[in-house]
Amino acid sequence: QVELVESGGGLVQAGGSLRLSCTASGSIFSFNAMRWYRQAPGNERELVASSITSTGSTVYADSVKGRFTISRDNAKSTLYLQMNSLKPEDTAVYYCNALQGWDNYWGQGTQVTVSS
């Protein structure tokens, strides 16, 4: 069973930065893709950024493009999300996701709150 543990959330002022981490219980090479999602109160969960294992490519939602960066440290089995120029509308619970074949794994989520 794969376990994903997120950390790094918190309260930050608008314009500030945070770095989220997601550490997997096994090698992240086994995942086809790793992603960050977020869910704000009353909203559906939305995809923020993706990291594709086979190609090394990354994809971002338009709302975060140019401000957020997804990256990996394979040796540490850790996925990161560097968030800069944060806005109040970035406030949400952020979830790490890993896709392995037909299986989808989720972390428990970490709260990010951006004050204006």
Image: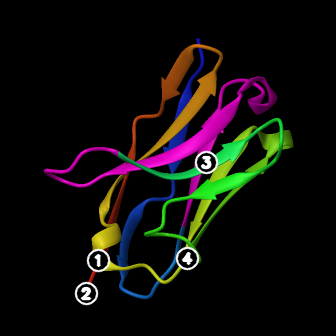
Name the amino acid, label 1: Pro
* Mark 3 to mark 1 CA distance (whole Å): 22 Å
The residue located at (66%, 25%) in the rendering is: 25
Looking at the picture, does residue 99 appear above or below residue 88?
above
* Mark 4 to mark 2 CA distance (whole Å): 17 Å
Question: Farthest residue in the front direction?
Answer: 62
The residue located at (51%, 58%) in the rendering is: 8
> Disc 1, disc 2: CB below 8 Å?
yes
Left or right of 97? Residue 52 is right
Few, some or many residues within 10 Å of mark 1 (<14, 14–19, 20+): some
Few, some or many residues within 10 Å of mark 4 (<14, 14–19, 20+): few
Name the residue beneath numbered marker 2. 116
Figure quadrant of residue 71:
bottom right
Q: Position of residue 42 (x, y in %)?
A: 13, 50
Question: Which label was assigned to residue 50?
Answer: 3
Image quadrant containing the C terminus: bottom left
